[in-house]
């Protein structure tokens, strides 16, 4: 056998039968259907987590052992039968001490979220229907210019900035009372 002989293995889409191709995405390489956008089948090329420890507890969904795993968003507990079983133990989300009604949909609330880089931002908990976000913690202060109900504190400076992306008026506390 030659060292330079091709060992290419072709895989076919289980949904439509077309050839799968290696593609680049936000989270790295993956196999995607060559008939995209008609077919949306994708398959990750690498496991996105690795096992730290297998636990004695069993999965309530399939009976396999649970494992402590390290993933791209930190450690979590998941089923050892992944990808056949997708059970994971969700960390209880702490309720924020403050609550802000989403100014866009006026139905849901803004909650702290962690972005891809680990930075905290605030987004509507009605996502994906409502996509309102703020890069900083909101403050319940009405803008004197456009009357938007939320503002953000200015970094390293006195005063506030309107959280309305169309306004972004900068104002002081005393301006609020006029």
Image (spheres, rainbow, N blue to C red):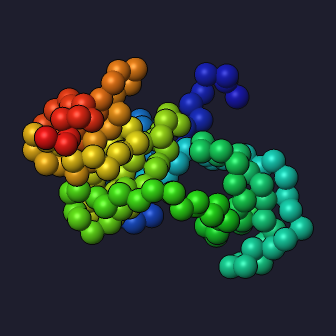
Which residue occupies 70% across, 61% down? 78
Q: Quadrant of the N terminus?
A: top right
Front residue (pair 160, 45): 160
Left or right of 147? Residue 110 is: right
Residue lying at 65% horizontally and 44% vertically, measured from the top left: 74
Q: Is residue 16 left or right of residue 68?
A: left
Quarter the C terminus occupies: top left
- Please determine whether, in this image, residue 79 is positioned above or below residue 36: below
Q: Position of residue 138 (x, y in %)?
A: 36, 45
Q: 77 or 144, which is in the foreground? A: 144
Most distant residue in the right direction = 56
Q: Is residue 26 above or below residue 5?
A: below
On the image, the x and y values in percent for residue 13 come to: 42, 58
Q: Would residue 77 appear left or right of 171 to someone viewing this image?
A: right
Q: Is residue 71 above or below residue 109?
A: above
The number of callouts visible is 0
Picture coordinates of residue 89, whole percent (x, y): 67, 65
Residue occupying the point 36% across, 51% down? 123
Q: Is residue 167 visible?
A: yes
* Camera-nearest residue between 108 and 28: 108
For the point 39% across and 47% down, the residue is 122
Occupied quadrant, residue 7: top right
x%, y% of residue 38?
24, 58
Q: Quadrant of residue 55?
A: bottom right
Q: Is residue 34 visible?
A: no
């Amino acid at each position: 056998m030659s060292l330079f002989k091709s060992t290419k293995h072709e895989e076919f889409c289980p949904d439509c039968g077309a050839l799968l191709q290696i593609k680049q995405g936000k989270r790295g390489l993956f196999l995607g259907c060559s008939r995209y956008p008609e077919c949306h089948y994708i398959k990750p090329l690498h496991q996105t987590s690795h096992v730290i420890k297998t636990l004695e507890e069993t999965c309530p969904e399939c009976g396999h052992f649970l494992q402590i795993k390290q993933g791209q968003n930190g450690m979590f507990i998941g089923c050892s039968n992944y990808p056949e079983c997708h059970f994971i133990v969700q960390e209880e989300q702490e309720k924020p001490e403050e609550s802000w009604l989403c100014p866009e949909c006026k139905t849901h609330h803004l909650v702290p979220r962690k972005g891809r880089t680990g930075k905290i931002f605030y987004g509507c908990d009605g996502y994906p229907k409502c996509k309102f976000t703020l890069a900083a913690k909101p403050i319940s202060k009405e803008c004197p210019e456009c009357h938007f109900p939320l503002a953000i504190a200015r970094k390293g400076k006195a005063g506030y900035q309107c959280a309305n992306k169309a306004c972004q008026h900068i104002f002081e506390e005393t301006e609020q009372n006029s």
